[in-house]
Image (tube, rainbow, N blue to C red):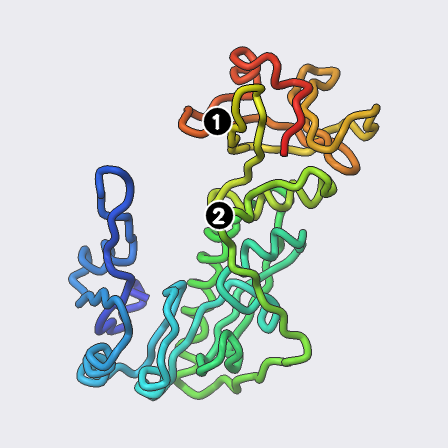
Amino acid sequence: MLDQSYNILAVFTKPDSAVGNDNKVAENPVRDLARERNITLYQPVKLEDDSVAILKSIGVDIILVVAYGKILPKSILEIPGFGCINVHPSLLPKFRGPSPIQNALLLGEKETGVTLMLMNDQVDSGDILNQDKFPIQDEDTAETLRHKLADLGAKILIETIPLWVERRIEPIKQDETQATFCQLIEREDGHIVWEDSVGDIINRYRAMTPWPGVFGFWNDGRTIRRIKLTKLSNGTVSERDGREAGQAFLDAEGRLNVQAFDGSVIIERLQLEAKREVTATEFLNGYATFAGAILQ
């Protein structure tokens, strides 16, 4: 939008927050770019009367919302003459809600996309201005897919805004009979259930990368330890040979596998809690008894 010479009157983004033991201010590229380009910046904790007054006073014609994480009240939705447009990373009405990218990967979808939608007072149910499909690659994670969809969203936004302002687009109502809703992703959603299929486990790994990451628990004989599994891939072992779901073992090539319901998953990299991330080979050099253990 900046490169297209639009007059951006203000940027609203989340307030600064401290992270880590040193209370360092969290990264916020939106905030940083606004400051770099000398755009008036607001970081309200809540969108209340003062935010409404600001938006009315500066005379906005259109509001663009991208991954803001806050619900816009009706008092704000009614301000701009050309409405509030949300860039949503799914093919609405499919995957309404807060985590459409992760949910698409969790379900093993082969296609997703971006929707430009006129916002109303319901969750992701407004009329559609534009929509574009995008293939999901087998190697995509939530991180890689988010970047790809961000690029697609920027592209169709630039294409759509002039047409909308010139009233050359007829908004399309969403088909409520086709609506699906996302589950909110929480930290514990990264816990792998080893009785699941290999496909479901790999899809969970893809959906939870980089956050919250996937993990399991290992009883090392002294304590139960949480292990973050930072890189997984499909195993080639299909026979169980008496192994329990969750049992770690080495395949014929010496690779660390874990038995799933219908095959195995290869652990390439992992990280014990409070330890550094290592390769599976490095890990086994320090914990030789891990092979044969049952992960929970």
Label 1 – label 2 distance at C-alpha: 16 Å
The residue located at (43%, 82%) in the rendering is: 164
Please state if 186 lies on the left or on the right of 234 as rendered: left
Q: Which quadrant would residue 6 be assigned to in this image?
A: bottom left
Which amino acid type is shown beneath numbered disc 2?
Arg
Which residue was labeled with disc 1? 272
The percent position of residue 118, horizontal first and vertical second, equals 46, 80
Question: Where residue 3 is drawn, which disc sits there?
Answer: none
Which amino acid type is shown beneath numbered disc 1?
Leu
In what quadrant of the picture does the C terminus appear?
top right
Q: Which quadrant would residue 85 be assigned to in this image?
A: bottom left
The percent position of residue 93, horizontal first and vertical second, equals 60, 73
The residue located at (62%, 47%) in the rendering is: 137
Above or below 57: residue 42? above
Please state if 131 lies on the left or on the right of 64 as rendered: right
Asked whether the residues under the numbered discs 1 and 2 touch, taking CB atoms below 8 Å apart as contact, a structural biologist would say no
Please state if 272 lies on the left or on the right of 35 as rendered: right
Above or below 152: residue 22? above
Number of disc labels: 2
Q: Foreground residue, 233 or 226?
A: 226
Q: Secondary structure at mark 2?
A: helix
Question: Where residue 187 is drawn, which disc sits there?
Answer: 2
Is the residue marked by circle 1 packed among few (<14), some (14-19), or many (20+) residues within 10 Å? Answer: some
Q: Secondary structure at mark 1?
A: strand
